[in-house]
Amino acid sequence: MTVNLHRLTTYSRKILILAATLLLVAGQFALPKGVYAEEKAASAAWPQEPEIQSASAVLMDLDSGEILYGKEDQTARYPASTTKLMTALLALEHSKLDETVTFSSDAVFKNETNSSHIARDVGEQMSMEQTLYGVLLASANECAYAIAEHVGANMGGDYNTFIQAMNDRAKELGCVNTHFVNSSGLHDDQHYTCAYDLALIAREAYQNETLRKMVGTRRYEIPPTNKHAEPTPLNNTHAMLSANKTSKFLYDGCQGGKTGYTDEARHSLVTYVERDGRKLVCVSMCAEGNDSYKDTIALMDWGLANFHKASLEDETLQSKVDEAIKASGRQGLSWQAKGTLLLPKDAAVRDLAVKLEPKKNGQGTDSANAGSGQAGADAGNAGNQSSGQAGTGAGNAGNQSSGQAGTGAGNSDKGGEEVYQLTLSLGGRSLLSQSLKAQNTPDQKDKASGASGIGRAIENFFGGLSDGIGKGFRTVIAPILLAALLILVLLALALLILARRRRARRRARKNRVRRYRGRR
């Protein structure tokens, strides 16, 4: 059978063009739309993390909210008296320090007899400031109850109004596995949070100057009241700040925090440290004995020794984000590099990878990486009391981790805003997520999304392939396309080799004919 060599060569060229097209399509599936990434070499590996005994823990940068360390940080735990950070925060946001707090019968008697208290009496009156010191330094449960009643009344309700406000504020902060039923932290199976959420609450509390001052106070004295003729001395119970009970855990730069203990929760501890321009908060939950202090010191030492504070105002980083915005094809988005992050000592801001993608309905609020734990409800509460793990039951099953996309399609709200999620990462570890918004006018919506009618259907189809079910398609289709690409390249090479051999044979045949004719 005679084969046209020109046609054979043309076929091989077309096959190569088809292979190049497949390569571009595979590239579309290999990376999500709107992603710009540049990974750092192995030298930017995350520092080796310390071994700790606490069941759950978090180390967070107070400035950015970046999670440096997380251990089961979204597993529900009983918080005990660390709850009082939220109580104090809400009180300072909804009352004045000179307001008079009156202790009711419920405030005095609706607390466990052997729990923390400062022996207030029914009808006793103190200022809000004095009552808050009772909560934050002595962990007095009757003070926490009285504050909830007083502030609840300020809100137009009662004690239960305040508890609902605690849950609303937690949701506002981006908490993923928190439910409060009291203002003190006394045990209740339905009163729980997680280390990540407690770090979010602690970070917000630290932004309040008055609260920051109070938790860092070693000693305070409540003056005589209408029920007590003598002053009431208060000592801070945090052993990394105060040597009231022991000096072996005193820590340079400690700014206080909050302790907590119940039989079910075991020991919980929130600690603030400032040193060399760095501000950290550490949360330890469900620890035995002094492990909460030992673990906190180990994590603080690790964070201070291995991370440096880096400004995000970097031209290289700004260029990466600008490129990501350009690649998204979305007009109206912008980002200005500002703020700081804590990075490993051998890493720089220019090493950060950038990812920009449409924010799905249900995706979490702006935050730093939520650590290594998984959000959501636990299966139940049976058998969890001794370990300090809270069982949240089916009612909390809808909780999702911060930054994880929920169900639903589209990312535009009623006002025509399109929201994109910008993520900064290092070595595959997400460090910081921020939302970028672009406002649509009615005629800009179709332009921003590409087209309408058939064009929009095509865009939605390919968008669904590369983004919608995203990773599943990329892990299945991309390998198939790349395998097909390899086969086509090999076929094209085989055809080229075949064409070359046929040319060589034709030349040899012509040469033999010439030699034969020459001899004749």
Image (cartoon, rainbow, N blue to C red):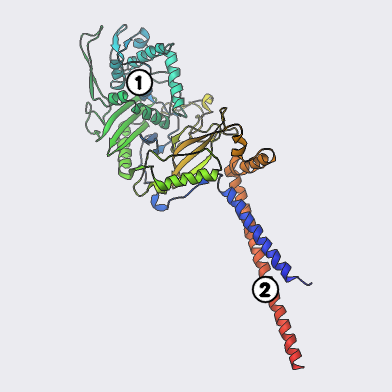
Q: Which residue is mark 2?
A: 500
**From the viewer's perspective, is 88 left or right of 30?**
left
Q: Are there few (<14), some (14-19), or many (20+) residues within 10 Å of tag 1?
A: many
* Secondary structure category for the residue under label 2: helix
Residue 25 position, x and y percent, is: 62, 51
Residue 424 position, x and y percent, is: 45, 42
Residue 77 vertical placement versus 69 (above, below) = above
Question: What is the CA distance from the residue labelled 2 to the residue labelled 1?
Answer: 84 Å
Front-lying residue, 434 or 41? 434
Q: Nearer the viewer, mark 2 or mark 1?
A: 2
Front-lying residue, 231 or 474? 474
Residue 256 seen from this side: yes
At label 2, which amino acid type do we have? Answer: Arg
At label 1, which amino acid type do we have? Answer: Ala
Q: Which residue is mark 1?
A: 88
* Secondary structure category for the residue under label 1: helix
Residue 337 vertical placement versus 115 (above, below) = below
The quarter of the displayed image where residue 510 is located: bottom right
Residue 259 position, x and y percent, is: 32, 26
**From the viewer's perspective, is 234 left or right of 5?**
left
Residue 171 vertical placement versus 9 (above, below) = above
